[in-house]
Image (spheres, coloured by chain):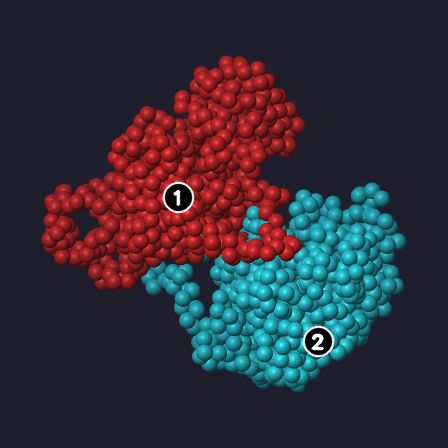
Chain colours: A cyan, B red
Amino acid sequence: MQQAQAELQASEWLARLQARLAARDAAGAAALFLPDGFWRDMLAFTWTIETLEGAPAIAAMLAARLEPTGAVAFALEPGTAREDAGVLEAWFRFETAQARGRGHLRLKDGLGWTLLTAMQELKGHEEAAGPRRPRGVEHGARRGRRSWLEEKQAHEAALGDSIQPYCLIIGGGQGGLALAARLNRLRVPALVIDKLARPGDTWRSRYRALCLHDPIWANHLPDLPFPDHFPVFLSKDQMGDWLESYASIMGINIWGSTEARSAQYDEAAGEWRVEVLREGRPVTLRPKQLVIATGMSGAPAMPRLPGAEAFLGRQMHSSAYTGGEAFAGKTCVVVGSNNSAHDICADLWEHGARVTMLQRSPTTVVRIESVMRFSSGKLFSEAALAAGITTEQADFMIASRPFRLVERIQKGIYDEIRAHDADFYARLERAGFQLDFGEDETGHSMKYFRRGSGYYIDVGASELVCQGEIALRSGVQVARLLPDGLELNDGSTLKADLIVHATGFEPMESWIARLISPEVAARVGHVWGLGSGTRKDPGPWAGELRNMWKPTAQPGLWLQGGNLQQARFYSRILALQLKARMEGLPTPVFTG
Amino acid sequence: MQQAQAELQASEWLARLQARLAARDAAGAAALFLPDGFWRDMLAFTWTIETLEGAPAIAAMLAARLEPTGAVAFALEPGTAREDAGVLEAWFRFETAQARGRGHLRLKDGLGWTLLTAMQELKGHEEAAGPRRPRGVEHGARRGRRSWLEEKQAHEAALGDSIQPYCLIIGGGQGGLALAARLNRLRVPALVIDKLARPGDTWRSRYRALCLHDPIWANHLPDLPFPDHFPVFLSKDQMGDWLESYASIMGINIWGSTEARSAQYDEAAGEWRVEVLREGRPVTLRPKQLVIATGMSGAPAMPRLPGAEAFLGRQMHSSAYTGGEAFAGKTCVVVGSNNSAHDICADLWEHGARVTMLQRSPTTVVRIESVMRFSSGKLFSEAALAAGITTEQADFMIASRPFRLVERIQKGIYDEIRAHDADFYARLERAGFQLDFGEDETGHSMKYFRRGSGYYIDVGASELVCQGEIALRSGVQVARLLPDGLELNDGSTLKADLIVHATGFEPMESWIARLISPEVAARVGHVWGLGSGTRKDPGPWAGELRNMWKPTAQPGLWLQGGNLQQARFYSRILALQLKARMEGLPTPVFTG
């Protein structure tokens, strides 16, 4: 199909959709889609993040939402329409009564297969940037005026005391900082608190060998891209320093060494009462909105093992492991076989320890080179940039895919990877490693979305496993600890001077139970996961990550998190929801 | 003229030039220019910054330089050629044997009126950025490897001791930091020292009310643009914080609280011996290259006045003034009428002091709104950005203009400004202010290039002068100080609790005399200025800023400075010269 023809067809389809919406004809609009078509909406129609699956679901959503959404206008982005293998794709901009947004369309046989509508800005409440940037220092002479520094210092002194933040963000990692940066640009007063002293300590305090598993192009934070000499793979400390600079440059209010102790929602006042310890001193904060951005993991999950008190060596959770310096020549057992288990095994080996990995269940392993070659590199690489796929565009390309489609795409990618790396996988299996690629062979990405665990992105440890440099015990569990090691459930024993429990973390909702109450945690329900019905991701199918970046069952409670790509993209979606509430705009949430 | 025709004509002219160069025909190449044409070269042909004025000068340069420069190839940047009022302009890229560069061409009647050739990168020594960025963390396991942090800490511990920087930069303001950032990307080991504690203190330590007089679009540092929500006019403290983040992000080695005491060049070893005091501890550094980046001003020029010891009030140089808090209700005299004098008068007034400005000689005043409207805003503004004039493009547009042309352009701009602001100027003169616009009516920009002083960019104080809120004494000098004030050379007296001497700074070469020796300072000669023969800029005409960003008469000695626009643009030019020398490439300098 010619470009011009593709453009015409996409335009015509959007015009038909626009006409059906204007006529308040939900059924007619839904009839423009394939029976199994998808509409993925981010706020624009639903004021939540929701994928409608199938024409009837689309019709039902529209029936409920056409009235409040008001007039909608679509405009194709010129030159973006293209057809490939029977699927026509195009990008477009759109407006609703309240907002402007960007969208993406896939047509098959002239009918809508997938539609994305993502709100990008609220009319009249745009970011104070570019042509809307503030003037800064006002010229002219005026007695009693304060300098930028004096204003800043006065605000910092009053914040949390005479001035309450509209939004309190617990957690100053990339998720919290990205959101705070977005909120600043939207003039939503926000305060970030973190239990560690300095921004970036979240990364700095992790184990010595940690590096980012995503390449640099995937990791930009909002509105301040990394300079283009930054390396492909950042070490944790360089990332930590970057976050510290980011917090300063973006003017983020952050309290370090501050721990949230409890949070109660006052329904009548519509605000939270959050008790925090700031450098040991109790402070009560009263934000309207509370965002938990402590990462997608809850507290360390440390197994309670019989005999633990009798063990004479050292044991720790992986989150407490900082480096192998002290363990040269020692005998070490790492329980677990996901990312941190592998990284810690390699780090101990590099420091001259004798290391055994104890693999309790099958694990997905994928070489980082193959991830870059067959998967993320198509969106995040110099080659992608050269092809015009900016970071922003890559984010939208990801957003354009409903999760049901992602499953299919990932399956295809893993077919390629498994063919390409057949030797590698054969060697791993010969070493005794129990591989899996997910129950439906969709690999590590779907495991990430479904449960946030169950895989290792190989940055070097697998070779040590293949060579036997890291000893392996697979398909076994720890039965109990002995004074000088562990006994496994097959009756065998292992000596150990050190046991590292790389046994994962409690689910994210455990923070809610601890901070607010078990009742609220139960009402909110499971956080993260798609409801795929696979292991650790119980159904029913949700189609979006549960409770992430969107309204929860608890008014004023929000969850921000995920990897850097998600923190970047969804921080805008979450910030718009907070801004709209602060401005008192109607935000009726579609609840299906 | 049609775009296509313009493009053809520009291409043909460049092809003719290329052919003449290939034929080593200096006279034939020069004959392609107007008799009074200009060729402004930055390194590509001359390994210095030089404007050849007139066809004979161009012929002479080429006769000397065609051989070492080798084959040259020009390629028009498509779509850039345009014709307006008889002048055809176009942008092009070019290559020499050693380097790649960018250039600009103006033709009149088919002949070269102006040509810019600016080296941008050395072949085989490109910046380690974009597709050449480092990989960062190496995957795989290797015993004894160091983390990014460990490498960084080890390097910092060794630097200046077992590891000597190839280049030592004295001064950690924007000039020093911009250059260091460029050198890092070119893998030239550099160390910056500054007498103040933290990067950015250069700005933070200035008077409270200081703000940048150039708008944000003009002030980007290399490779890390300000986020687009930064205000149009930055306060000094926000700029200070930015520089601190910049130094961290760009990985700049900087020693704070470090003062350079002396520097001697060892001709035999081809290196400097620089004695510094680092936090009070003496350290000897041995760089091959020494860059003075202490700003375009030398030490404060504090007048020696009879009676100074008898004065009972406070007196200080403007550089020591931090704010007017202590002077509410006090009687203050500010000697001088340039930028800092005006700013300090307004700040004292804002704090409730009674202020008199003592204007010793006529001064150029220009409203900042008019600068933005008639001058810099055409290159640095949201409107310019919307018209495709990026910061980089604006820099090149400035570079494309030989200074003789800049004089004409500035004269025209000032004609417009003086017509537009006639009322404003009339009111100032009625208040007794002695205005001038430069000896040739070219205004503040030419004063900046010629002498770096003699003007006020009005950000509010002029209105106070017009209204008499700042009292004015014009055309007088201080004769001597009295115990309670000053006596002027017209015999009148002024009471004063505070006297601020906004009397400027010694010329930049005073640093060289102090740090190295008066002999070397004399050999290097005057720094800054064009040799226009106007006040404080003695001839002969140099056509470029003397000694700035280019080889000086002292091997291994360089000067970096100027405003943020210059620091940004010329830091690349200077960095390329340092890189070429480090790599031992031939860098024969054309000396006319």
Q: Which residue type carries mark 1?
A: Ile
Where does label 2 land, which residue? A493
* Residue A583 left/right relative to B371: right
User: Would you name the residue on which mark 1 appears?
Assistant: B169
The chain ID associated with circle 2 is: A
Q: Residue at x 52, y 49 (%)?
A: B224
Quarter-of-image position of residue A317 = bottom right
Name the residue at 48% across, 21% down. Answer: B65
Image quarter for residue B169? Answer: top left
- Is residue B400 positioned above or below B230 on the image? above
Q: Residues within 10 Å of mark 1 (few under 14, many from 20)?
A: many
* SS type, badge 2: strand
Q: Position of residue A542 (x, y in %)?
A: 77, 71
Q: Nearer the viewer, residue A503 or B570?
A: A503
Q: Examine the rendered structure and indicate whether residue B222 appears above or below residue B411.
A: below
Total number of numbered discs in the rendering: 2
Q: Amino acid at mark 2?
A: Thr
